[in-house]
Image (cartoon, helix red, strand yellow):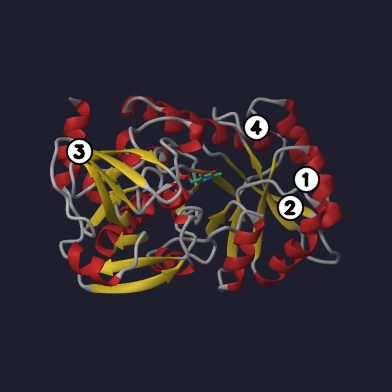
Amino acid sequence: MEADKEKTRYFLTMPFPSLSRLHESISTPALLIDAARMDKNLRGMQAAADARHVALRPHIKTHKAPVLARRQRELGARGLTVAKLSEAELFAGEGFDDIFMANQLTQKAKAPMLNKVRQRARLILGIDHPRQVTLLEEMLSSPGPPLEVRIEIDSGFHRCGIEPESDLLVDVARLIRQSPALTLEGVFTHAGQAYGARSPREIKDIAAREAASVTAAAARLKKIGIEIATISVGSTPTAKEVIRHKGVTEVRPGNYIFYDRIQHALGSCRAEQLALYVLATVIAQPGPAQIVCDAGSKALNTETGAHGMHLVKGYGQPMNVKGTLTRLSEEHGIIGLERPEEIAIGSPLLIAPNHACVVANLYDFYHLADGESVQIVPISARGKSR
Ligand SMILES: Cc1ncc(COP(=O)(O)O)c(C=O)c1O
């Protein structure tokens, strides 16, 4: 019953009125962006952050495209967030001069890239252990200005980060203060557990804990004379909620540019906000209630939830036929139709992906569609996993 309602909602919000025309000229599988929806998503998050006087530093892990990061900057984003040094290198090379890598850097083989990026851009790194201080000191070429770092706080996701009440927080902060190579600029957290939330109430509670953990950490450090400039939080499910809390100065959502089925299931967005789609082609109809398309796991990924969690049924939502993407092999997507129906072989199939970030990593470029006009946007940081 619930699933039926969900399908109806998706059909009511069908993007790309000229789908057949787009399909005549775009070789599939391909990634389509609805430009108007994307722009609305960007403006919506920017307005929410502005209204709370919180800086928006979008995570580029979702779109991986300098063209789209420029749009975020035009609308008011202050700096950007990356997860990997190779992403920082690419965006620094594209002229982005304020980059926070919300992650730890511990491999000495990365020292040349680290020093190169720092010559081009302001780079801030994450830290949550004394050993990382030593490793960074060894990696940084001297002389140079101290490297800005932020201490990662665990706000309940239990991935990386220090508990705000742990002694380790003070130890690491003092060690950074003593280091001539580093300077402590902020604290940050990511409440990834929000992707397992079962209700909007739970998301609110997670956002409250997210904010409380970093503000408590900053307050503890202040008590021992260490002032923190930036208190940074953020995930797409919690973003609009967590910025309501006092003390937060920066928010780092990434997925909000497109949203996706997982965000929709979590209640982060409405169906008409979904801006990213996989365009596929029907290649076969082996039976009356089954069609096969040319988008398999290499075009859709197999995630049914973020961070390894399970949230939605099927491997994407077909938008223009009533059915479920029940099975994927690498180059084939198998759709079970709701009821027997003849579907023209060779016709377009539009699919709302489950998790936009991982799907974007599978393509070289987007087709940014604004009515009839289509712009090719390179996904330049695709595959930048080092
Ligand atoms: C450290 C960090 N910050 C921000 C984000 C962005 O969150 P979201 O993907 O929910 O937009 C992520 C996503 O994984 C993250 O790991």
Q: Which residue is labeled 1 in the image? A: 176
Farthest front residue in view: 286
Mark 1 crowd level (few <14, some 14–19, many ≥20, 10 Å Cα):
many
Q: State whether residue 231 is above or below residue 66.
A: above
Percent coordinates x, y for residue 163 in the rendering: 64, 28
Label 4 to label 3: alpha-carbon separation:
62 Å
Specify which label sits upstream in the sequence, 4 or 2: 2
Q: Which residue is labeled 3 in the image? A: 289
Identify the residue at horizontal 67%, vertical 51% (top origin): 125
Q: Which residue is labeled 4 in the image? A: 220
Mark 3 crowd level (few <14, some 14–19, many ≥20, 10 Å Cα):
some
Mark 2 crowd level (few <14, some 14–19, many ≥20, 10 Å Cα):
some
Specify which label sits upstream in the sequence, 2 or 3: 2
- Say if mark 2 contacts mark 1, CB within 8 Å: yes
Percent coordinates x, y for residue 105 in the rendering: 72, 49
Label 2 to label 1: alpha-carbon separation:
6 Å
